[in-house]
Amino acid sequence: MKVYGIGGLGVDKRVFSELTLNFDITPLEWINPEPNETIQNYAARLSEQIDTKEPFGIIGISFGGMMAIELNKILKPQLIVLISSAASKSDIPIPFRIFGRTGLLKITPNFLLKPPQFLANYFFGVTEPKYKKILKQIIADTNIDFLRWATNQITIWDNHERPTNMLRIHGTSDRLLNFCQHDDVTVIPKAGHFMVMNKADELSQILNHIMKYER
């Protein structure tokens, strides 16, 4: 089974760099959203990067996990794995959803879309200097137009479907996205939203175990 990976908000393949995996990941490249494009239409265009002629799975991180769910609706992956992500609308914190309904995001100045470093470190759960530096660079590299579009899609996401071929991995200290205690979720204790990097060893063991039995 070929495994495709989708990073978070505009994040490229660097987000997988700390993982030690026994299988290969083919990162999908984010594409520029079209004006007023829905997440469903975007997913359809992104799906062109996936070879559906052979069995495949998708690993999605944060917003990439939400995109994996949308791809799952139009393709037939054997498995989707959500890391630090939301599986449905109910996993998006209520303040985010309220903000999305106000429409204020459309008029928010660009300089307010990227948080100050200390806030980013707090919400992503980053304390180590190495990962603070990486997070700072990732935020700096994120395209502002993509960030505005994707942030809006997160706040208005209306998905209620929880796929049967979905596995979830979430940190118990994630300050950005929720998970329902009743869901079948593999938790990493004391891990935050950036656990794909600063909890990479634990996450790698879980992913390797999953893929060992799925391939």
Image (cartoon, rainbow, N blue to C red):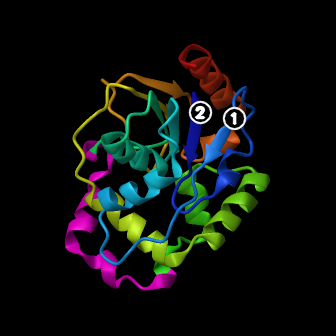
Image location of residue 33, percent across then percent down = 42, 71
Q: Name the residue: 66% across, 60% down.
A: 135
Q: Write down the region rendered in magenta.
A: 89-111
Residue 167 is a magenta residue: no
Q: Would you say the residues marked 2 and 1 are in contact, meaning their CB atoms lie under 8 Å apart?
A: yes
Which residue is disc 2 drawn over? 2
In the image: residue 160, left or right of residue 39? left
Which residue is disc 1 drawn over? 24
Q: Name the residue: 56% across, 20% down.
A: 210
In the image: residue 123, left or right of residue 162? right
Image location of residue 204, percent across then percent down = 67, 29
Image location of residue 161, percent across then percent down = 24, 37
The residue lying toward the viewer, choosing from 133 and 15, is 15
Picture quarter with the C terminus: top right
Give the amino acid type for the residue marked by disc 2 in the picture. Lys
Pointer 2 or 1: first along the chain: 2
In the image: residue 60, left or right of residue 177? right
Residue at disc 1, secondary structure: loop
Quarter assignment of residue 198: top right
